[in-house]
Amino acid sequence: PPKGKGPQGKRITLKVAKNSVRVAFNGRRRLDLSKMGIATFPKCILELADVEELDLSRNMLKKIPNIIEKFQNLMWLDLHSNQLDELPAAIGTLRSLTYLNLCNNKLKGLPEELTLLRNLRTLNLGLNCLETIPTTLGTLRELTELGLFDNALTIIPKSVKKLPKLEKLNVKRNPLPEFAEEEEPIDTVKRIESLYLVEKKDLCGSCLQTCQGERDELHKLEDMTPGPSNKPSFPSLVTPNSTARDNQEEWRMK
């Protein structure tokens, strides 16, 4: 490539682009230029600007030019896995967009115009370099899915968390305070690992008698108020779990 320029990538001709148009089952036409080695937005595709869907994912694009505004019918735009570090202001003119995938790029910020896409239902901004997202993203009230995972976010605006139709919000692997690892509290009381519960009617006579005896002993222990110096001692008290362990197999069989 010429000095000072990045990779030129594959050049897309209008013929190649026309052959890459597919009609989906819902009748929409999708221009699929995914995985084509494109490094520069191919201007020839402006001839096909009436398509409803455009897939430019998995390429080497660093910029999307403002001429994207020519695609006024777009409802679905996939730009994931490129090298985009910014979006053009003209993205805000694509008012019919319901799906926008910008995952796995190098975005450090978002244009304010993104909040003009009031019909957006799915917005994926995961795997970027975002440190903040504008509170005005909360104006996208049709959003049902929002991906913000794997960024550098320290706060998610309340306006975004409270979006009325939001069903999926993925904020994993961000340096958010709520994800700070909490130390395991020291447990001074040893917890019961296993507890077996049965109804009275399921116990045989001898087991029932044993359990009732132990329960009475425990109640006596609860009712006692120890004197100032002489602590009561119950060397013969059997813990319920020890009896439970002896009778587990029998209970299971019934």
Image: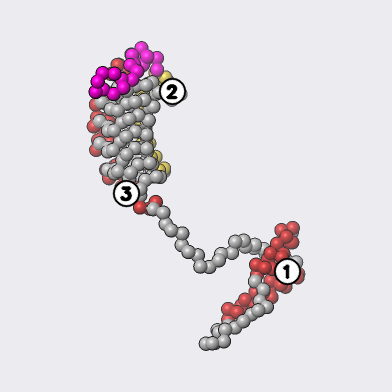
From the viewer's side, name the closer residue of 178 and 252.
178
Q: Residue furthest right?
A: 205
Write the start and end of the magenta stretch as one range.
1-20
**For numbered disc 1, what is the local secondary structure?**
helix
Magenta stretch holds residue 187: no
> How busy is the neighbourhood of tag 2: few (under 14 within 10 Å), some, or many (20 plus)?
few
- Where is residue 204? Give x, y as percent: 75, 66
Report how far apart the C-alphas of labels 2 and 3 lie in the structure. Answer: 39 Å
The three-letter code of the residue at mark 2 reads Ala
Q: Is residue 6 above or below residue 165?
A: above
Q: CA distance from mark 2 to mark 1?
A: 69 Å
Provide the major secondary structure of the magenta segment.
loop
Q: In the picture shown, does residue 195 fall above or below 105?
A: below
| Residue toward you, 153 or 5 | 5
Identify the residue shown where x is 27% and y is 38%: 109
Q: Which residue is mark 1?
A: 207
Label 1, residues with CA under 10 Å away: few <14, some 14-19, many ≥20: some
- Please name the residue that numbered disc 3 is placed on: 155
Counting residues from the start of the chain, the first of labels 2 and 3 encountered is 2
The disc labelled 1 sits on which kind of residue?
Answer: Cys
User: In the rendered image, which quarter contains the N terminus?
Assistant: top left
Q: Residue at x 29, y 44 (%)?
A: 132
Q: Quadrant of residue 246?
A: bottom right
The reply to whether the magenta stretch includes residue 9 is yes
Residue located at (32% from left, 45% from top) = 153
